[in-house]
Amino acid sequence: MHKINDDLNMSSTFIAFDFGMTKMGVAIGQNITNTASPLDPIIMRNGNPDWGHLEQILKEYNPTTIVLGKPEVTSKSSEALMKKIKMFKTSLERDLNQEVEWASEHLTSEDAKEKLKLQRQEGILSRKIMKGQIDSMAATIFLQDWMNQR
């Protein structure tokens, strides 16, 4: 259950993670402007984040809630990934004392690729789209959806 702010002046910050085995997309959002933005992805090693780097991000942004992308489980490999994501969620909650909520990440990677391609065409992005950018844009998309539904 997420915290509800009755006081409109109360600022809440949210961080979203799009968990992947090689890179984890990261996005930041806040309720005052109701906008989400991508951050640099976190490099994963054997499906594990650099916990020191992750804790540094959490300390810097001090999120009210972490929003974790929940993929559809459609195969053995997506089932194995979901198991890793659930372990990550448990570590965030238990070890780092964070409030974590799920958000559907269905088709967000495809949407992210399209958004980044448009940004390149419009001259907003000047270089080749990197894999980590797609992950962080996907996290931005599902975080924005999650914030819009609050």
Image: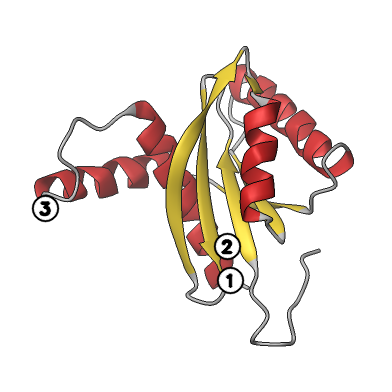
Say whether residue 50 is visible: yes
Name the secondary structure under disc 1: loop
Image coordinates for residue 125, horizontal then vertical, percent: 19, 44
Image coordinates for residue 49, horizontal then vertical, percent: 64, 25
Q: Residues within 10 Å of mark 1 (few under 14, many from 20)?
A: few
Eye-nearest disc, 3 or 1? 3
Eye-nearest disc, 2 or 3? 3
Amino acid carrying label 2: it is: Trp
Residue matched to label 1: 149
Amino acid carrying label 3: it is: Glu
Say whether residue 108 is visible: no
Residue 132 higher or lower than 75, as above or below? below
Residue 146 higher or lower than 117, as above or below? below
Question: Residue at the location (62% across, 49% down)?
Answer: 60
Image coordinates for residue 92, horizontal then vertical, percent: 78, 40
Q: In this view, does 103 lie to the left or right of 97?
A: left
Closer-to-camera residue (78/47): 47
Colour basis? secondary structure
Q: Is residue 15 left or right of residue 108?
A: right
Amino acid carrying label 1: it is: Gln
Q: Residues within 10 Å of mark 2 (few under 14, many from 20)?
A: some
Q: How far separated are the C-alphas under marks 2 and 3?
A: 27 Å
Residue matched to label 2: 146
Contact check, label 1 and label 2, Cβ < 8 Å:
yes
Name the secondary structure under disc 3: loop
Quarter of the image for the N terminus: give it: bottom right
Residue matched to label 3: 122
Q: How far separated are the C-alphas under marks 1 and 2?
A: 5 Å
Give the farthest residue toward the right.
94
